[in-house]
Amino acid sequence: MSRYLIRRIDENPVISLRTHTELVELEGTDRLERIRWRHEQTGEIEACDIGHVFIMAGAEPNTRWLDGCVALDDNGFVKTGADLSTEDLEASTWPLARPPYLLETSRPGIFAVGDVRAGNVKRVASAVGEGSIAVSFAHRLLR
């Protein structure tokens, strides 16, 4: 999440952050009216009359299973294109004379887009755009 958005949320008196909680029940008839959540540390369940919920699921990529398959940065995001160092390409034994395409990982023909990619701006619109670019590169490879 960007710093400016964190600051705006922190400074807004009508927003209440509930970190380390799990939503356990959403109630309402025609719309959301009430929420119940469980505190991770205490196990206590709390309820509140709320009509809107925004969830921040976190910004840690679930990519450790890719370690050793494609190059990851220190935070676990997949490195692509120009973000791949010479060392990354040597470690993966990059077999082609050309450098990786813009969204191509350290493995030829494998692309990464969206939030999982190092350097991504973490917005849905950019992920969609990156996906369409990756498709065009995939078509190029298949020719």
Image (cartoon, rainbow, N blue to C red):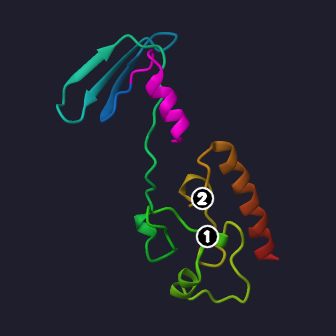
Query: Which residue is painted at 64% across and 67% down in the image?
Result: 111
Query: Which residue is painted at 43% across and 44% down in the image?
Result: 58
| Residue labelled with disc 2 | 119
User: On the picture, is 31 further left or further right than 23?
Assistant: right
Q: Position of residue 36 (x, y in %)?
A: 32, 20
Q: Position of residue 133 (x, y in %)?
A: 75, 60
User: On the picture, is 134 further left or further right than 25?
Assistant: right
Label 2 and label 1: CA atoms lie apart by 8 Å
Which residue range is magenta in the image? Answer: 1-16
Q: Is residue 126 above or below residue 109?
A: above
Check if mark 2's residue and mark 1's residue have beta carbons within 8 Å.
yes
| Residue labelled with disc 1 | 83
* Amino acid type, residue under disc 2 in the picture: Gly
Tell which of 27 and 74 is nearer to you: 74
* Amino acid type, residue under disc 1 in the picture: Asp
Tell which of 91 and 1 is nearer to you: 1
Q: Quadrant of residue 28?
A: top left
Q: Quadrant of residue 45?
A: top left
Query: Which residue is painted at 69% across and 88% down in the image?
Result: 96
Crowding around mark 2 (Cα neighbors within 10 Å: few <14, some 14 to 19, many 20+) is few
Among the two numbered marks 2 and 1 on one chain, the one whose residue lies closer to the N terminus: 1
Q: Is residue 106 above or below residue 41?
A: below
Q: Is residue 113 above or below residue 83?
A: above
> Which of the image's four quarters has the C terminus?
bottom right
Q: Is residue 119 above or below residue 98?
A: above
Q: Position of residue 18 (x, y in %)?
A: 34, 28
Q: Position of residue 141 (x, y in %)?
A: 76, 76
